[in-house]
């Protein structure tokens, strides 16, 4: 199936222009106003979030991190969620591969393709890149995901949609202490506390974690702080200020050949005597990443009887030292942004939203050779001045057609620039883009237990500086001048996505969530690794690619005598392939074809015992030429919960119960062989337990 781009844009534009143009809320309001009762500013009620997500004509997720028994990595956070797949790289506080419909999947570390939001304001820098470790589940009250191009957040233009983290606030007085420990010296502590006083409330979240790692050279440490304070001087006016800090450092054990990954999954290059071990000795080259980020944001909301205005501003600064086995990349990033929204509720005449989103980043980046002898910085071979700017103007229309059907649509006008200038030579590349992105969908909802949807959505993705600025460093200690940079002129990635699905409940036992989608993509941005596993090249595929798949989630519970059983599961099917061109008919490497995950718990009084499964039942290609595969695997786990009072909860987990040796992930190449270091082994059997004290 293909969609003629000009035709679908014309149809959606004409449909939008035929509607009554008045500037709602495609995203949730920040509070509920009840006459005669004060509600602390910045609070979010789950019913309101559900209502907002139900207005989206596509697949969505609503996640409550505090409900998770284990919450040490992003895999724990997104476990059993349809449409969101996380492939671990090193098993610590690292850069896992986040896969939402294959958007940005080949970037390594995965750093594009999804818009991350913190309290509705972007976490991405203005070039579109993000650091995935900035997602902080333990400081997050509720998380929402709008999967794919159906996202209608102003500035959300990628194929992967958006992930929004809503912080705790003092509107929910109280707090908790969470302590967690496990094997391989894993330990963490986290405190949340908040309260409200008259028209003011506050929340503070502080945490720290450390982990020696399953593999050699895989230690990681993280310290986090987030705080917010809100004031609501009147029923119609509220303001909230947010401050957060994240300091994360982790070592990278890097890749192994398929044979080494099978025989000695804890090892790294440098533990043997092969040529790769000698040239790519991880202990000497010391690949690691260390970043610290400060972020300050503010949102002001003014609500009238049938309208609401929201103004958000933010600033974040990041010092990022990313050292792979060949090069040190030092980034010093300052990002500023602002967002204005006007929401109008016209009742039977529909809901409307007019939004403007702007962001700008200064991202100077230095490049040094990594010494093969001791991992220190060698000669400098690049010093780039990088600047990025974006402006998005968005109009959202939700128009009721009758009692059951609603038309949902959006038009976004986007301008973007990516300017790269060398301080060490004449290299310069300035690029600008302007485009219109239309989206059109329909939602059918006849009862609270059934919601069906269909949408046709465009997406356009501009390359980040990780793809534009390409280092080239020889693996052997290079002489001055042998390492170099090139500026890579790329087109924006364009796609049209058709999605159909729904969610609902069957009685009191079973809930379901189903999405089927197909994206026809032009100029897909693909990044591939060198022989040694370091990203070597990014390019637009010169022909069409297709991402299509199925996202299915089920959940529920049923009684067993005086007890009950709860369950949750997800199946994510990803059929991504090259439609023509040099790899015509081949699968696009990077995404597992099938991922099955699930859990079932037996509840008896204060106790709950359960089992979990995570499986990739197929062998999956690791290269676009489809010459080498990642083996299939099944992982089983056990959980135990004991909650004698509402204020005390104890838990314990066993992961990879069978101590299976498997490859959690891999680097993507055009063509791989078994002799190349490619695979990242997953963790063996592991234990962890914890205590949560709440008040």
Image: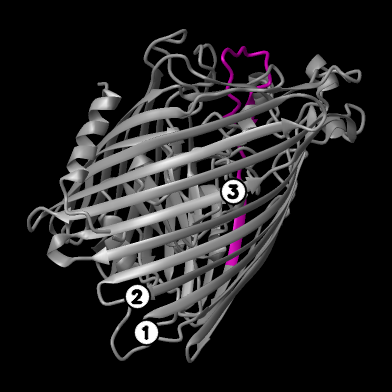
- Are the residues flagged by discs 1 and 2 in contact, CB closer than 8 Å? yes
Q: Disc 1 designates what residue?
A: 235
Q: Main secondary structure of the magenta part?
A: loop
Q: Residue furthest top?
A: 582
The residue labelled by disc 2 is 303
Specify whether residue 616 is in view.
Answer: yes
Tell me where residue 32 appears, x and y as whole percent.
Answer: 33, 76
Name the residue carrying label 3: 360
Q: CA distance from mark 1 to mark 3?
A: 33 Å
Residue 692 at what x, y percent from top left?
56, 72
Residue occupying image coordinates x 72% and y 20%: 532
* Badge 1 or badge 2: first in the primary sequence: 1
Upstream in sequence: badge 1 or badge 3: 1
- x, y (%) of residue 394? 36, 50
Query: Contact, CB < 8 Å: mark 1 with mark 3?
Result: no
Q: Which residues are drawn in magenta?
A: 665-690
Residue 1 lies in what quarter of the image?
top left
Q: Secondary structure at mark 3?
A: strand
Find numbered disc 1 in the image and state the secondary structure of the residue it sits on. loop
Q: CA distance from mark 2 to mark 3?
A: 28 Å
Few, some or many residues within 10 Å of mark 1 (<14, 14–19, 20+): many
Task: Identify which residue, 195 or 449, lies in the foreground.
Answer: 195
- x, y (%) of residue 636? 48, 43
- Relative to residue 420, is residue 151 drawn left or right? left
Does residue 686 belong to the magenta stretch?
A: yes
- Rendering colour mode: one colour
Mark earlier in primary sequence (2, 3)? 2
Q: Residues within 10 Å of mark 3 (few under 14, many from 20)?
A: many
In the foreground, 409 or 268: 409
Residue 692 to residue 295: above or below: below
- Answer yes or no: is residue 83 visible: no
Residue at mark 1 to residue at mark 2: CA–CA distance? 8 Å
């Amino acid at each position: 199936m293909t969609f003629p781009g000009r035709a679908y844009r014309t149809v959606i534009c004409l449909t939008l222009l035929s509607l009554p143009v008045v500037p709602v809320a495609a995203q949730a309001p920040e509070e509920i106003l009840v006459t005669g009762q004060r509600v602390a500013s910045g609070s979010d009620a789950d019913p309101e979030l559900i209502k907002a997500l139900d207005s989206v004509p596509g697949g969505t997720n609503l996640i409550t991190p505090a409900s998770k028994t284990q919450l040490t990595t992003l895999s724990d956070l997104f476990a059993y969620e349809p449409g969101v797949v996380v492939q671990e790289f090193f098993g610590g506080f690292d850069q896992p591969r986040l896969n939402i419909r294959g958007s940005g999947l080949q970037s390594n570390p995965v750093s594009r393709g999804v818009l991350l939001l913190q309290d509705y304001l972007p976490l991405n820098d203005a070039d579109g890149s993000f650091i995935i470790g900035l997602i902080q589940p333990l400081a997050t009250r509720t998380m929402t995901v709008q999967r794919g191009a159906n996202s209608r957040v102003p500035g959300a233009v990628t194929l992967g949609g958006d992930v929004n983290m809503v912080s705790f606030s003092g509107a929910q007085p109280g707090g908790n202490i969470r302590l967690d420990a496990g094997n391989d010296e894993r330990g963490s502590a986290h405190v949340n506390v908040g309260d409200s006083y008259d028209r003011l409330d506050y929340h503070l979240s502080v945490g720290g974690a450390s982990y020696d790692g399953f593999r050699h050279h895989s230690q990681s440490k993280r310290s986090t702080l987030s705080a917010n304070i809100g004031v609501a001087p009147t029923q119609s006016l509220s303001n909230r200020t947010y401050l957060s800090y994240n300091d994360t450092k982790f070592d990278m054990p890097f890749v192994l050949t398929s044979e080494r990954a099978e025989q000695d999954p804890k090892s790294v290059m440098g533990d043997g005597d092969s040529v790769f071990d000698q040239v790519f000795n991880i202990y000497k080259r010391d690949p690691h990443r260390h970043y610290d980020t400060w972020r300050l944001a503010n949102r002001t909301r003014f609500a009238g009887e049938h309208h609401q205005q929201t103004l958000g501003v933010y600033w974040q600064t990041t010092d990022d030292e990313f050292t792979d086995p060949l090069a040190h990349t030092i980034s010093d990033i300052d990002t500023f942004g602002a967002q204005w929204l006007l929401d109008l509720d016209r009742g039977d005449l529909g809901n409307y939203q007019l939004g403007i989103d702007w962001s700008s980043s200064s991202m100077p980046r230095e490049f040094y050779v990594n010494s093969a002898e001791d991992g220190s910085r060698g000669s400098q071979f690049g010093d780039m001045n990088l600047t990025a700017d974006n402006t998005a103007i968005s109009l959202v229309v939700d128009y009721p057609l009758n009692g059951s059907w609603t038309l949902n649509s959006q038009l976004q006008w986007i301008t973007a620039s990516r300017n790269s200038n060398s301080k060490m030579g004449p290299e310069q590349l300035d690029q600008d883009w302007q485009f219109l992105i239309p989206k059109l969908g329909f939602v059918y909802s006849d009862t609270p237990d059934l919601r069906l949807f269909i949408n046709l959505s465009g997406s356009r993705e501009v390359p980040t500086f990780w793809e534009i600025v390409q280092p080239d460093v020889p693996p052997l200690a290079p002489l001055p001048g042998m390492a170099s940079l090139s500026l890579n002129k790329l087109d924006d990635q364009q796609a049209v996505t058709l999605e159909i699905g729904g969610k609902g409940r069957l009685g009191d036992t079973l809930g379901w969530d189903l999405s089927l989608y197909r994206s026809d993509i032009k100029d897909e941005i693909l990044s591939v690794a060198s022989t040694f596993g370091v990203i070597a090249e990014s390019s637009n595929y010169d022909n069409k690619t297709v991402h299509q798949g199925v996202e299915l989630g089920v959940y529920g519970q049923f009684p067993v005598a005086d007890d009950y059983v709860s369950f949750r599961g997800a199946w994510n099917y990803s059929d991504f392939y090259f439609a023509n061109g040099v790899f015509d008919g081949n699968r696009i490497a990077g995404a597992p074809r099938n991922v099955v995950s699930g859990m079932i718990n037996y509840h008896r009084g204060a106790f709950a015992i359960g089992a979990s499964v995570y499986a990739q039942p197929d062998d999956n290609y690791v290269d676009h030429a489809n010459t080498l595969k990642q083996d299939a695997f099944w992982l089983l786990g056990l959980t135990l919960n004991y909650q004698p009072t509402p204020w005390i909860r104890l838990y314990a987990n066993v992961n990879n119960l069978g101590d299976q040796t498997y490859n959690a992930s891999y680097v993507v190449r055009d063509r791989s062989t078994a002799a190349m270091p490619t695979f990242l082994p997953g963790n063996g059997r592991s234990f962890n337990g914890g205590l949560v004290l709440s008040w």
